[in-house]
Image (cartoon, rainbow, N blue to C red):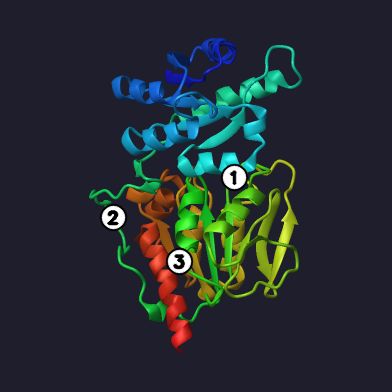
Amino acid sequence: MVKVLIVDDSKTVSQYLEFILGNDSEIEIIGNVTDGEQAIDFVKKKKPDIITMDIDMPKMNGIEATRKIMASTPIPIIVVTASRNANDKNISIEALAAGALTVIQKPVGIGHQNEEMKTKKLISLIKTYAQVKVIKRRNGIFKKETSKLNLSFSVKRIKPLIGELCNKKYVAVGISSGGPLVLAKIFSKISVDFPYPIFVVQHISAGFLENMVDWLNRLSSIPIKIAKDKEVPLPGHVYFAPDNFQMGLNLNKIELQKCKKGVRICPSVAHLFNNLALHYAKETIALILTGMGKDGAKELKLLREKGAVTIAQDKESSLVHGMPGEAIKLGGAAYVLNPDYVSNMLLEIENYTLKK
């Protein structure tokens, strides 16, 4: 049974959400509150499996409440908000950076267009995300814990030596839930002087990527953009795989392939890592960071076997340790690092290159 807390100041909306969710035999509504302060008080007394969180509320809005809950009693949070907020990509990116797992539009009401499909999607998301193990964050940054991973294979918790890093040509990053904040932390340290292009596959709801890239550009000095087909990647630039396209490299040019019908994950980390393993493994630094699922885990191992420097984010700093955790279990990561170590490693590469 999935225990849900509804947080919404509209009585009509909260009652409708209760009606929708209450009709599912696997879901139990254990609370229904009207603002962020009440939500924080509620989770101190009872711990739901998941929270549906509105944004615009009196006393404390949903973004601030999400931030505070993730800093004290971390619980999976889905932002369920009005269409103007769901469609305002800056608000959505801020919610994701605060620790929300996804942002969706509120259901409108029985009889509206596509309402049945939207209701089924909401129920499916609640059941899926309720299983996610999230971690504490303080002031928007992941809390550092002292627990240790039980590693039964060759993996290191120190940074790679500069000698392993200075003869590469590419950096590839796969990331999902919790990605915006981690990427902001990493990219804010480096600049256009970084010697390699960086390719990123970020799992994010369709339509949010452009605003996330704009947000990252405001926080970073390294140029960040959405990749274009046949583009020659430049050192000191970051290239994101576009919505609905797989990204790879071909003859040192970016190659985009339109997603095939029925492909579950697109863009996928697996596609990018496979492509680099086939052509550029020994020239690649590959990172698999916070996120749900297993995308890219097997392919990181393949890259390691073919000579790439491979890194997974540690459990203590991952909002969700699905992708990096799976890569670690498979033996795909030569190094297990937190975002501070990753950003310092990239800065070290940049400084070493400038001194040459």
Q: Say if 353 sits above or below 157 in the image.
A: below
**CA neighbours of label 2 inside 10 A, class few (<14), some (14 to 19), many (20+):** few
Secondary structure found at label 2: loop
Which disc number belongs to residue 151?
Answer: 2
Which disc number belongs to residue 204?
Answer: 1
**CA neighbours of label 3 inside 10 A, class few (<14), some (14 to 19), many (20+):** some
Secondary structure found at label 3: loop
Q: What residue does disc 3 label?
A: 189
Find residue 30 and report its image quarter.
top left
Left or right relative to 266: residue 56: left
Residue at 44 percent across and 17 percent down: it is 33
Distance in Å between CA atoms under marks 2 and 3: 29 Å
Residue at 26 percent across and 48 percent down: it is 145
Q: Say if 261 sits above or below 54 in the image.
A: below
- Asked if disc 3 and disc 1 are in contact, CB closer than 8 Å, the reply is no
Considering depth in this image, is 352 or 304 the residue closer to the camera?
Answer: 352
Q: Position of residue 109 (x, y in %)?
A: 68, 14
Considering depth in this image, is 106 or 134 the residue closer to the camera?
Answer: 106
Mark 1 vs mark 2: give the one in front: 1
Residue at 62 percent across and 22 percent down: it is 120
Considering depth in this image, is 328 or 347 the residue closer to the camera?
Answer: 347
Which one is earlier in the sequence, the residue at label 3 or at label 1?
Answer: 3
Res 334 visible: no
